[in-house]
Image (tube, rainbow, N blue to C red):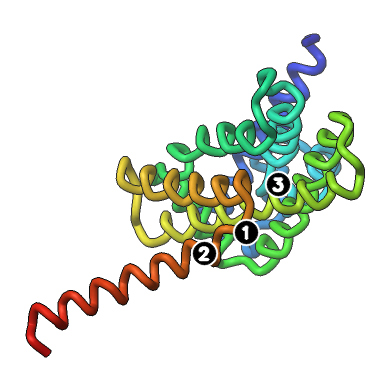
């Protein structure tokens, strides 16, 4: 990477860091782009050159995350399924999302309808990145869109669960285990299909009824 590109990346990161500090302290709506620009030592025009909207300032890591998602599909080892590759990618994020510092990020989103709306755009961007990567793999475009939508729906639920958990004050190893467990279950359903979901539910209900009968017999009722 050349010196010019390195400087541009450093400037972008500086702007994003200043913005996130302000957002965490005062909330998204109470911070202006002009304030961020002044604190970062750049013009408003420069901020918008790097971040087209104020919401993009908050979700500054989105382009990198989209590239990582596509790379997980394109660069996965031979013989590894797409589902397994994305499971591996998202499992690697669990500890970061269970860090106490994530709570500030989660709180800003929770308090901002604008950021919640932007989140839908972010997920659509992820779906397009996944679709393009799948099409490059030779998957039919229609199938790729459907598959990408399903894969990204897991990612969205994963992110929302992590956010709710963080806002509830659940952090550390136990929180990581819960989040990993939810993620594993979601990807297992994708990997093996939803066809067995109802049968599994019936089996659980039958097991509960059987246990209830046994308890009734033992109690003499």
Question: Upstream in the sequence, badge 2 or badge 3?
Answer: 3
Q: Could you tell me which residue is drawn at 67 percent across and 22 percent down?
A: 79
Disc 1 designates what residue?
A: 195
Question: Upstream in the sequence, badge 3 or badge 1?
Answer: 3
Disc 2 designates what residue?
A: 199
Classed neighbour count for the residue bearing mark 3: other residues with Cα under 10 Å, few (<14), some (14–19), many (≥20): many
Q: Is residue 168 left or right of residue 71?
A: left
Where disc 3 sits, the SS reads: helix
Q: Is residue 51 above or below residue 153?
A: above
Foreground: disc 3 or disc 1: 1
Q: Position of residue 59 (x, y in %)?
A: 68, 47
Q: Where is residue 28 in the image (x, y as percent from the top left)?
A: 62, 59
- Is residue 177 visible in the rendered image? The answer is yes
Tally the numbered discs: 3
Q: Do the residues labelled 1 and 2 touch (CB within 8 Å)?
A: yes
Q: Which of 195 and 32 is in front in this view?
A: 195
Classed neighbour count for the residue bearing mark 1: other residues with Cα under 10 Å, few (<14), some (14–19), many (≥20): few
Disc 3 designates what residue?
A: 57
Q: Where is residue 112 in the image (x, y as percent from the top left)?
A: 62, 66
Where disc 1 sits, the SS reads: loop
Q: Are marks 3 and 1 in contact (CB under 8 Å)?
A: no
């Amino acid at each position: 990477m050349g010196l010019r590109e390195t400087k541009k990346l450093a400037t972008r990161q500086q702007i994003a860091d200043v913005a996130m500090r302000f957002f965490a302290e005062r909330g998204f709506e109470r911070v202006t782009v002009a304030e961020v620009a002044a604190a970062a030592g750049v013009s408003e025009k420069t901020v918008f050159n790097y971040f087209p909207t104020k919401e993009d300032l908050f979700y500054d890591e989105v382009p990198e995350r989209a590239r990582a998602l596509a790379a997980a599909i394109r660069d996965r080892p031979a013989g590894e399924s797409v589902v397994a590759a994305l499971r591996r990618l998202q499992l690697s994020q669990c500890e970061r999302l269970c860090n106490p510092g994530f709570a500030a990020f989660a709180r800003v989103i929770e308090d901002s309808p604008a950021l919640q709306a932007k989140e839908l755009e972010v997920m659509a961007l992820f779906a397009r990145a996944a679709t393009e990567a799948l099409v490059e793999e030779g998957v039919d475009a229609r199938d790729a869109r459907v598959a990408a939508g399903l894969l990204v729906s897991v990612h969205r639920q994963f992110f929302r669960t992590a956010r709710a958990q963080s806002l509830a004050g659940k952090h550390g190893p136990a929180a990581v285990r819960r989040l990993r467990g939810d993620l594993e279950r979601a990807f297992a359903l994708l990997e093996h299909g939803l066809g067995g979901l109802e049968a599994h539910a019936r089996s659980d209900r039958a097991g509960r009824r059987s246990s209830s009968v046994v308890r009734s017999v033992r109690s003499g009722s």
